[in-house]
Image: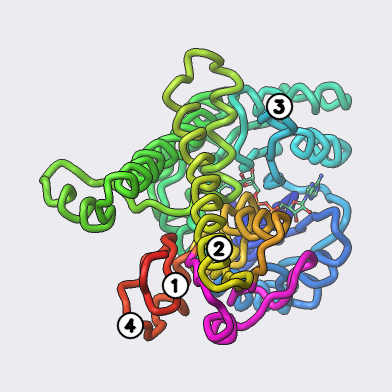
Amino acid sequence: MKQSKMVCVIGLGYIGLPTAALLANRGYNVHGVDIVQSTVDTINRGEIHIVEPELDTFVQAAVKSGKLKADLKPTEADVFIIAVPTPFHEGYVPNIDYVVSATEAIAPYVKEENIIILESTSPVGTTDKVEEVLKKEGVDTSKLYVAHCPERVLPGYIMRELVENDRIVGGITIEATKAAAAFYKTFVCGEVLETDAKTAEMAKLTENSFRDTNIAFANELSILCDKFNIDVWELIALANRHPRVNILQPGAGVGGHCIAVDPWFIVHAGGKDAKMIRTAREVNTYKTEWVIEKIKNAALKFENQNGRKAKVACMGLAFKPDIDDLRESPALYITRRLIADGLNVLAVEPNIKSYKEFEIIEYNEAIEKADIVTFLVAHKQFKALDIETDLDFCGIQNKKGKNV
Ligand SMILES: NC(=O)c1ccc[n+]([C@@H]2O[C@H](COP(=O)([O-])OP(=O)(O)OC[C@H]3O[C@@H](n4cnc5c(N)ncnc54)[C@H](O)[C@@H]3O)[C@@H](O)[C@H]2O)c1
């Protein structure tokens, strides 16, 4: 495929914008689409609206060269990439409304020989649904190449992983698989693995369910170790010396748009046959509630001992270290719940300047003022702190490092 071709990227968030900027820097003409005017304006100024290392350089260069333009509306293109959110509705029911409306939006611009790629993480069958929606909008889909290519980049390393990761490409026909795979091969140096659309959809959900299940094991261990008065970090380090054991690290729960969400897509479709995947989700959700209870008990104990309410520092709000992404974040959930339950909270998030619901303060100030410091996210700033104790990330300690 000649790189002078036009690619239309729908959804300019954590996935769509890096993809659009990368393609533009690789010589494609890229028309990026988002429904948020401020996002479009920011990108057209050569700036970014999200935190992701190196992305600013890519976007600035792409916009300056005229290869990347953002708009509220799609345009005719050779390749359409849909990278819109796929959250869930109430009750963990998958919500593909954004995918449907993005597909409706491109329908008037789609023509013969176009490649339509769904990159959003999707319940099995969604790529077929994209074709169905196009048909419903009056598009002749017989000469289109409709495929799914799940994204599996790690926030913080997106620009590198977009190029280096292996990609799974599954078309709704063999021809669609081949056409979409040929497109990815123009900018991916990892392997491009070909399959069908349903397997590609399920592969992404499987990857995240695998991670969720393994994290659930570590989280359950942390709760059990607390009960048995065993240091879980030491326990895991020792158990991992077994040549075939590799236990992950526990945390305050599981967050983000992927691991905390995608397993539900399997559970929703799999029903009672998705026992382990459902249980892992439940364990990880329970871990967050468990942390809340621990902090509340510590605060109560402090109040009983000192005759005044404890100031509790919540260190970190993001869903994982060193990013600003708050989606499905257990740390944010914990902070909100503590505030709602009347605790005196000092909220800290070094990657965010302000937050709509409560004040965010500097971490040094929070530690200085707090009676109880809770490390909810292992941000690099916190790991570098010179505190005379072993920092028990996601554990609960008072300022002198004594467990409370
Ligand atoms: N963020 C990640 O690390 C990551 C990793 C792998 C897969 N994914 C998947 O990629 C998809 C996108 O995730 P994201 O993190 O980029 O989401 P995001 O919320 O950061 O970005 C989505 C963007 O789409 C825009 N949008 C919504 N509806 C639209 C429409 N109809 N037309 C045009 N724009 C529209 C939103 O305004 C937003 O800017 C999701 O399915 C997610 O699960 C994300």
**Horizontal and vertical percent for residue 139?**
83, 27
How far is mark 1 from mark 4, CA to CA?
Answer: 11 Å
Q: Earlier in the sequence, mark 1 or mark 4?
A: 4
Please tell me whether residue 374 belongs to the stretch shown in magenta. Answer: yes
Location of mark 1 (residue): 398
**Horizontal and vertical percent for residue 176?**
58, 30
In the image, the segment drawn in magenta is 346-375
Q: Secondary structure at mark 3?
A: helix
Type of residue at label 3?
Lys
**Would you say the beta carbon of the disc 1 residue lies within 8 angstroms of ligand 1?**
no
**Horizontal and vertical percent for residue 391?**
36, 71
| Quarter holding residue 52 | bottom right
Location of mark 4 (residue): 388
Identify the residue shown where x is 50% and y is 34%. Answer: 281
Q: Secondary structure at mark 1?
A: strand
Location of mark 3 (residue): 143
Give the mark toward the camera: 3 or 2: 2
Q: Secondary structure at mark 2?
A: helix
Whether tag 1 and tag 3 are in contact, CB under 8 A, the answer is: no
Q: Nearer the viewer, residue 90 or 336?
A: 336
Residue 331 as seen in the image, left or right of residue 245: right
80 lies above or below 373: above
Identify the residue shown where x is 48% and y is 19%. Answer: 274
Identify the residue shown where x is 85% and y is 35%. Answer: 104
Structural crowding at the residue carrying mark 1, measured as other residues with C-alpha within 10 Å and reported as few (<14), some (14–19) or many (≥20): some
Viewer can see residue 55 = no
Structural crowding at the residue carrying mark 4, measured as other residues with C-alpha within 10 Å and reported as few (<14), some (14–19) or many (≥20): few
Type of residue at label 1?
Asn
11 lies above or below 396: above
Please tell me whether residue 42 belongs to the stretch shown in magenta. Answer: no
Location of mark 2 (residue): 299
